[in-house]
Image: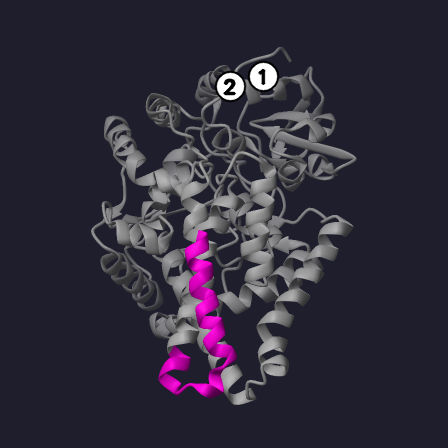
Amino acid sequence: MSSVTQTQLLKRNAAAASAAPTSVPENYAPLSLDISRGKGFPAIFPNNHKMKQYTWEEVAQHNTESSAWVYVGNQVYDITRWLDHHPGGKEILLLTAGRDVSDLFVTYHPFTDKAAAVLAKYHIGEVKTTEFPQFAPDRGFYRECRQVVGEYFAKNKLDHKDPRSGLWRLALFLMGAALGYAVMCKADAYGWPARIAAAILFGVCQALPLLHSMHDASHLSIGSSPVWWRTIGRLCMDWFAGASIYSWYNQHTIGHHVYTNIMGADPDLPMAETGDMRRITPFQKLTSFYKWQHVYLMVLYGLLGLKFRVQDITGTIIDGTNGAIRVNQQSSYDLFMQAVTKSVWVLWRVALPLYFFGVSSAAFWSTFFIAELATGYYLAFNFQVSHVSPQAVWPDIQLPMSDEWAINQMHTSIDYSHGSWITTFLSGALNYQSIHHLFPSVSQYHYPAIAPLIEAVCKKHGVRYNKLNSFAEAFYAHVEYLKQMGREGKDVHVHHM
């Protein structure tokens, strides 16, 4: 395959769109069943049978440092020799090895054609099947979004990964957490109002670095070096919060951001038609159990932080999955470091207050769980309003994806409180969810300036931009959606052709 630019690759895909399904083919269905939604789909691009043909299962076997393959569209690349030369480091490539990186590739190289020219050198064949259904090729919407945003950064001479805004905020949050921790370590010297206030302060300041610095690090958008991403990401997620950024990579970066709101692919959604505590997709069976989900989920949301710390062991390490996403084997060093960080977290978070500072068990465990509930609620409420809402669509994995990837991001994401600096600060810019999903590799602190540019492109291309006036409105919409799905299951936006 000759050297080509990313723009040429996109043009080729756009041309191939005419050959992609425009109606549901009779034979378009999962090739094998995995749980209830299915894995294994026919490739939507026409194949050149003169080239070596692979199945997605064959590509998936090449997911290690000794043999790393990926595919973009239906083109397969052996990137093993590139691992040690990748400017972004080998870790992120090994996370994506053995997978379809069609949309990840473009979103993490949004303003350059250099990456496509390099990738072309490693072409080895084509896939005839894909693990998950692929989106319709970009017909111009996302190309124009990338163009106008790229011009904005060039014109204003801005670094779209500038870490400075994230660093001073991180310092502020850690100081707030330290204050709360200091009071909790002397809990017996204070009354209950001070204990509760300190626990809530610590809980919120435990969540904020995850929404800000860790989130940007997981998307390679805080600084331009893997040293930045690895150091800040693990500091916030592993050492400070006691969870695992590797698990988060698989759930959030590899899974949720590509297959947003697609049951059977998005790890944030229920995996089966029955048995989940939540009914949030139209593909789950409605039972009377869900009638009060808008009440009991408000309680369970507080456990999210605790769930993360268990899931990264039971799912990511033991089961080797995160929802529908296969987890590539971690290196021995990474597994060792995960054990170290969890041990250190238990030491400073539990053992020091109890055994070094002598906090009574009653005072310690009460403030511990108040802090954890504060973290869980803070994260869950920010996450849930962004996608689980009446305005969001729910693509059917059993049908060809009629939308382009970027348009699906717009249709499945909910923005709110544009122009409110305090909401942006408190939510880690998740109130610009659509912008975040289009440009995850851009620092969140640029989203308010980018949003009007994307709104203009949406208007030009006739793409709906979901935007509410406030967090309160977004939260109310989320609760109403839970009621709706739990009682009637009607009037939801199932997204078909």
Q: Quadrant of the N terminus?
A: top right
Residue 329: give x, y in percent of width and height: 72, 48
- 135 in the magenta segment: no
Task: Name the residue located 38 percent from the left edge and 81 percent from the top edge.
Answer: 194
Secondary element at tag 2:
loop
Q: Tell me residue 75's x, y (percent).
A: 61, 24
> Can residue 347 be seen from the camera position used here?
yes
Residue type marked 1: Ala
Q: Position of residue 390 (x, y in %)?
A: 29, 54
Along the line of sight, the residue nearer the viewer: 276 or 250: 250
Q: Residue furthest left?
A: 469
Q: Residue at x 56, y 49 (%)?
A: 233
Q: What range of the chain is rendered magenta? A: 170-196
Q: Residue at x 48, y 19 (%)?
A: 16
Quadrant of the frame with the C terminus: top left
Identify the amino acid type marked 2: Asp
Tag 1 residue? 117
- Give the prevailing secondary structure in the magenta stretch: helix
Q: What percent of the width, then of the height, locates residue 265?
A: 53, 48
Examine the structure image and report whether residue 172 is included in the region drawn in magenta.
yes
For disc 2, the marked residue is 113
Q: Is residue 332 above or below residue 375?
A: above
Who is closer to the viewer here, 166 or 377?
166
Pointer 1 local density, CA inside 10 Å: few below 14, some 14–19, many at least 20: some
Res 276 seen here: no
Mark 2 closeness class: few <14, some 14–19, many ≥20 residues within 10 Å: some
Name the residue rendered at 48%, 78% in the picture.
184
Regarding mark 1 in the picture, which secondary structure is present there?
helix
Taking 282 as reference, is 265 left or right? right
Task: Give the vertical position of 160 relative to 29 (above or below).
Answer: above
**On screen, 193 above or below 32?**
below
- The answer to the question of whether label 1 and label 2 lie on touching residues, with beta carbons closer than 8 A, is yes
